[in-house]
Amino acid sequence: MHQPPSLDYKKPLDINLSVPRKVPVVIVGAGLVGLTLALDLARRGVPSVVLETRQVLTEGSRAIVFAQRSLEILQRLGLGERLAEKGVNWSLSRIYHRERESFSFDFKTEPYFGCPAFLNIQQTYIEQWLIEDCLASGWVDLRCLNTVTSLESNSVGASVMVSCPDGSYRLDCDWLIACDGARSFVRNTLNLPLFGRHFHDHFLIVDVEMKPDFPAERRFWFDPPFHPGHSVLLHKQPDNLWRVDFQLGAEADPAFEKQPARVTERLKAMLDPKITFRIDWISIYTFRCRRLENFVHSRVVFAGDSAHEVSPFGGRGGNGGIQDADNLAWKLCAVVKHGASPKLLQSYDEERVYAADENIINSTRSAQFITPPNHAIETLRQASLVLSETTAMGRTFVNSGRLSRPARLSGVGQFLPDTSVKGRVKPGDVALDAPVKNGDENSWLLHFIGRKGFTLLCYRLSSNYDGGVNHIEDINSPYPLEIITVVSATVEQPTVASIDITLVDHCGLVAKRYDLACGSVVLFRPDQHVLDVFSSFNRDDIEKTLAHSMPIATYAERKI
């Protein structure tokens, strides 16, 4: 078993201060989401203080399924090579009904993306790497055994009282970010309710160390002979560990079901007698699908499980939290460093509430199929499972967990509905990756999107086409803007002083996936979302789009 990360306690400097210090950002909670946010801010040069009650972080595997979008975010933050080396890459899911396989499907619908469709890895590994990189950055003050005991907030900032082994202190901040989980102290202190549903079925999670001859696939059983009347999920993890989820039902006794002898009995019923195994970790859970009405409350912002909870089916909890951090970090940076109006954070609220609702809807539907709430739905489920063995239509009704995908945000938050964009990728979509060449080096498009801030991609098909890019340095952007040109493999690379980098679309997939013609321009946000697509370079249109996405603080806001 990978040992959970352990933090070193140090006496906070604030203990000795007679006047409370004010910092730009305080993050409550050093879990997956809080650490991702802290590192993203650090990569953008924004300091933060992270307050964590625990000294030893996550035990057991917890979240293990990380979707392509989360992997792309973690790649941008510098974790890509470690994830690829340690994680278990998979894309195939098999569905079983009783003793037979009903069908299978592959989530990897097309090749040539830099990150896999899904990667299984214990949450503890990612948290360990995030901690290491946060500390190495010099921008993150990570404090374990520092517990927030009270807080105050208003329109200009927030303050927290913190208890630690050396005493108590007050810390003021411009922004307080609550990443303190489903039992959020910050949320409870502000008396903010969560709206949604509580499902009462119990589920048993077991991390099992064994070496079976199973491929790296997702396997889901409905009503198997070894666990009749319920469902079972099997996933492979690194270190010869396997995650097994047993549905137990609403009437199960958690204390009894957690006993190692009882768990061993269930595993022996499931596995071939020749397979030897060791139980590594046991947990029992119920789940909820619910969220806060709003994620932004003046200068207090909620992210991850403190803002929304979903069922574990589909891996939408941890993945959704990472995407919260991705959306929030650049906007905090824009306000703290680049003069943006605090109103920019309203788009975080709108976009991530929309995404949370999408996750909750999908998770609720999965939960209702896996744990039918009444006889009518149970009958429908049984019919779907029978039909799925022989018909494609029946398979569309089977829901063992709709796996995490990024929300398409057209018409939400900063993204205006743009019916003029006819291609596959539209404003509000996450950027699609594609292979490119940077000089003689093979690389991926996403490695160059959002590196410094906004990114303007200009596409050329001929070496004598200028398309206005020679005047691109005239663009007025309040936030860092990087210019890249993408050319086809047959084009001689242009020399334009105002272009930061030129990439070669040697497979033609950049043009295909973005439906680009000669002179097309794509504007990306710092979080690698498509802000707009232009048929040709037009400085006024680009500046208008940039201004809409990053409103400048008024004089009164700057004086705060």
Image (cartoon, helix red, strand yellow):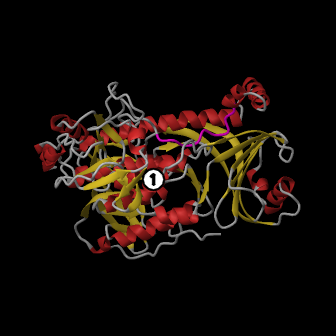
The answer to whether 351 appears left or right of 80 in the picture is left
In this view, 1 is above or below 107 = below
Q: Is residue 376 magenta?
A: no
The answer to whether 286 appears left or right of 511 in the picture is right
In this view, 277 is above or below 516 = below
In this view, 467 is above or below 183 = above
Would residue 292 be seen by someone viewing this image from the given angle?
Answer: no
Image coordinates of residue 102 in percent, x first then y, are: 77, 37
Q: Say which of 263 and 465 sits in front.
A: 465
Image coordinates of residue 303 in percent, x first then y, are: 43, 48
Q: Say which of 178 and 551 sits in front.
A: 551
Q: Which residues are magenta?
A: 398-406
Image coordinates of residue 39 in percent, x first then y, are: 38, 61
Residue 267, image quadrant: bottom right
Q: Amino acid at mark 1?
A: Glu
Q: Give the number of marks.
A: 1
The answer to whether 458 appears left or right of 96 in the picture is left
Residue 241, image quadrant: bottom right
Q: Say which of 262 and 219 sits in front.
A: 219
* Category of crowding for the residue at label 1, using alpha-carbon neighbours closer than 10 angstroms: few (below 14), some (14–19), many (at least 20): many
Q: Say which of 344 and 387 sits in front.
A: 387
Image coordinates of residue 259 in percent, x first then y, are: 78, 60
Q: Is residue 399 magenta?
A: yes
Would residue 324 be seen by someone viewing this image from the given angle?
Answer: yes
Query: Which residue in the protein does label 1 denote?
Result: 72
